[in-house]
Image (spheres, rainbow, N blue to C red):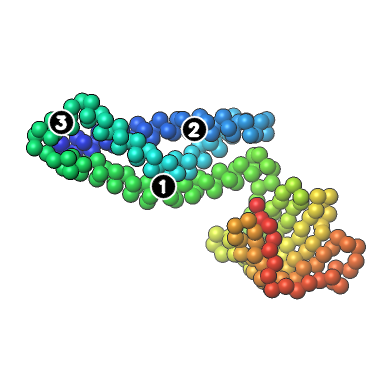
Amino acid sequence: MILHRYFANRFLVIFLSVTAIFTLFIGLIAYVEQLRQVGARADATQVAILTLLNLPAELYQIFPLIAILASLWFFLSLARSSELVISRAAGRSIFQTLIAPVAAMLFVGSVIVGLGNPIVASTKKQYVELRETYFDGRGANFSIGSEGLWLRQGDDLGQTVIRAARSNLDGTVLFDVTLISYGETGGPNMQIKADTARLETGRWVLRNVTVWPISSGENPQNLAQNLRQFDVPSN
């Protein structure tokens, strides 16, 4: 039991060492890359915050590589110090020697999967929102008041203001929706009303829709279209 504990502790120390090395290496590269991308649009503190928020997602992706390198380092260190030979000479088989590091790796993997997923999801969401705010200046902004829920989104081609009477808990499904699209010149060019709007990858999917073009100079009511589904791009 003492030997199992020793091997497990040693493996955990090596695993944490490899993780620390990758954290410093990836963090430095990511920080320099963020500085290169933003230029003068954000200061060093803002870039550091963005780098730290994105770091858990980067490390989570390379967790298998960290585990492999930590395992190699562990067994190479045992071989170089002759501890593996001593363990075999004491009558312990190689499978008994593997019990401690395998158990330690299973524990680490369970912790990373159980705690890492929500942490990565939360920090990644904050990273995306802050990046849009700092770098693009067009982050999506929610506000809830007596007149319902409001959302603004935009890109280089214009802005879209979305108003909904209510939404689900995470804001991915809106009900009783009105959208007004603004072009590059700043004037409105389309009004849309829909029963529901569901956020999917890169778009809002609207159901039971009425579309009024309002940029042609004609009466929008004469050009109105009733559609069962209509897609609106989303960033």
x and y percentages locating residue 8 in the rendered image: 23, 38
Specify the amino acid type for callout 1: Gly
Label number found at residue 116: 1
Identify the secondary structure beneath mark 2. helix
Mark 2 / mark 1, whichever is N-terminal: 2
Q: Is residue 224 above or below residue 216?
A: below
Residue 176 visible in the picture: no
Which residue is painted at 66% across and 55% down in the image?
234
19 horizontally vs 210: left or right: left
Label number found at residue 185: none
Identify the secondary structure beneath mark 1. helix
Q: Is residue 125 above or below residue 24?
A: below
Q: Which residue is mark 2?
A: 27
Residue 112 visible in the picture: yes
Of residues 210 and 230, the one nearer the viewer is 230
Residue located farthest toward the top when viewing the structure as drawn: 81
Q: Which residue is mark 3?
A: 85
Q: Quadrant of the N terminus?
A: top left
Image marks 2 and 1: residues in contact by CB distance under 8 Å: no
Of residues 87 and 27, the one nearer the viewer is 87
Specify the amino acid type for callout 2: Gly
Of residues 174 and 2, the one nearer the viewer is 2
Give the distance between the C-alpha atoms of the residues marked 2 and 1, in whole angstroms: 18 Å
59 horizontally vs 74: left or right: right
x and y percentages locating residue 67 in the rendered image: 34, 40
Which residue is painted at 45% across and 30% down in the image?
24
Give the distance between the C-alpha atoms of the residues marked 3 and 1, in whole angstroms: 37 Å
Which residue is painted at 22% across and 29% down in the image?
79
- For the residues carrying marks 3 and 1, which lies nearer the camera in this image? 3
